[in-house]
Amino acid sequence: MPERDLYHNTVKAALVKDGWNITHDQFPLVYGGRRVYADLGAEKLFAAEKAERKIVVEVKSFVGQSEVADLQEAYGSYEMYRNILAELEPERIIYLAVTQEAYNGIFSEPLGQLMLRREQIRLIVFDKIKEVIISWIP
C-alpha cells in the first residue's frame, strides 16, 4: 500500500467528527489489472433524504517546495480516481481534502480557481489543528 499523506489521520478524524463512517482506510481501486489507492472511503446516512452518501477522499498536504507542482500532482490523482470511480462505483463522489492554508493559498489564486471551476474539483477544507471540516466545496 502507498504511504499515507501527512494529514491522513487528521482528515479521518475530521470526517468521523462530522458524522461519517470510515469504510476504507485506503480505498482500493482496481482497473484493468492495475491497483491504486485513494486515501479514504466513507459513508453517511442522511435521514432527512432517506439516502446514504458514499465518498472517496484523496488527502493532499500541499507542503512541497512548489504549490503548483503539488496542485499538478493532486489533480492527476484526483482525476484518475474520479474516472475509475465513474466506471466502477458511480454512486461514490470523490473529494480532494486540503488544509485551510492550501485553500487560502493556491486554491484562492487565479490558477486554483480555474482548476476548481473548469475541472469541477470537489474539496473538503479542513482545520489541521482542530481536526474539523471547515467547508465542502461545492
Image (spheres, helix red, strand yellow):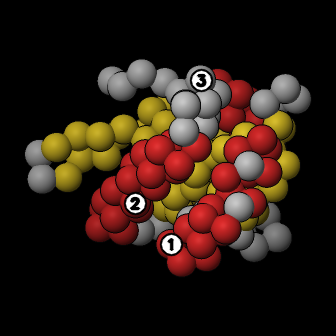
The image shows residue 109 at horizontal and vertical percentages of: 71, 61
Q: Which of these two is toward me, 1 or 44? A: 1
Give the Cα distance between marks 1 and 3: 25 Å
The image shows residue 66 at horizontal and vertical percentages of: 54, 39
Q: Is residue 17 visible?
A: no
Q: What residue type is labelled 1?
A: Glu
Q: Which residue lies furthest to the right in this view?
A: 130
Give the Cα distance between marks 1 and 2: 9 Å
The residue under label 3 is 6
| Label pair 1/2, CB-CB below 8 angstroms | yes
Image position of 112 (left or right of 46): left
The image shows residue 38 at horizontal and vertical percentages of: 43, 41
Q: What residue type is labelled 2?
A: Glu
Relative vertical location of residue 80 with respect to residue 130 in this rendering, above or below = below
Answer with mark 1 or mark 3, whichever residue precedes in sequence.
3
Q: Residue 27 carries which label?
A: none
The residue under label 1 is 119
The residue under label 2 is 79
Residue at image x 60%, y 37%?
62
